[in-house]
Amino acid sequence: MLSSLLANNTENITMVQLLICTVSSIILGVFVASIHMYRNVYSKNFIVTLAILPVLVQSVIMLVNGNLGTGMAVLGAFSLIRFRSVAGGSREITSIFWSMGIGLATGMGYIAYIAVFSVITGVTLILLQLTNFGKQSKVSNRLIKIVIPEDLDYPNLFDDLFEEYTHEATLDRVKTTNMGSLYELCYSVMLKDQTLEKDLLDKIRIRNGNLTVTSAKMATNREEL
């Protein structure tokens, strides 16, 4: 059932076989493009490319037809196109690889094989998109800078708040500002739930006399320490 359509005729491909492979490539290419459009940001040019790519790859594979030298030349051409193209996201790369795989399979006559493979892959991608699989956790690493008056004793000043809203909180730096009348405390924290960040900042502002409180991503601000 999953054997090659061209198994018994690798040198002389008939028009019927060519049409079956080409139509299969077009249908499966449109299928890949449709799956990619589901809950993804895309451009029309990219979608058209996904739909037509299997036919192009199929035509090249049929021309190679087992010739090692020609196959190496085709491999070089694909490499040239790859390095001259702009790198996309992981989902774009997956769809391109999928489309090329369809072209390779149809070019070798494995119509049933690639059809079954594509249906399974498409259904799996949709199911993964519909579920929470791979969804980013609400846990967030933040860098919080708190300005306090000089008369406040900062050790353990916010420990109860950090215990309530964070998994971990570390005081990384203390410095004086405004001619020594203020202290700036810099904490590295891991929030339990980033949706509650505002609640934490509001309670800190109550405790520090409504002075400046800054919260930023850890990665972009570590160098400022």
Image (spheres, rainbow, N blue to C red):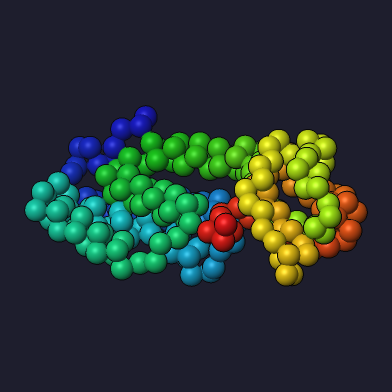
Outermost residue, left side: 69
Side of 117 where 35 appears, left or right: right
The reply to whether residue 67 is visible in this rendering is yes
The quadrant of the image that shows the N terminus is top left
The spot of residue 12 in percent (x, y) is 17, 49
The spot of residue 137 in percent (x, y) is 66, 41
The spot of residue 105 in percent (x, y) is 32, 44
Q: Residue at x 48, y 65 (%)?
A: 46
Side of 179 where 3 appears, left or right: left
Quarter of the image where one finds residue 29: bottom left
Q: Nearer the viewer, residue 33 or 164?
A: 164
Q: Is residue 47 above or below residue 196?
A: below
Side of 179 where 23 appears, left or right: left
Q: Is residue 26 above or below residue 109?
A: below
Q: Residue at x 22, y 37 (%)?
A: 7
The reply to whether residue 143 is visible in this rendering is no
Q: Residue at x 43, y 54 (%)?
A: 93
Side of 212 where 189 appears, left or right: left
Q: Nearer the viewer, residue 10 or 123?
A: 123
Quarter of the image where one finds residue 133: top right
Q: Residue at x 47, y 52 (%)?
A: 90
Outermost residue, top side: 1
Q: Is residue 109 above or below residue 148?
A: above
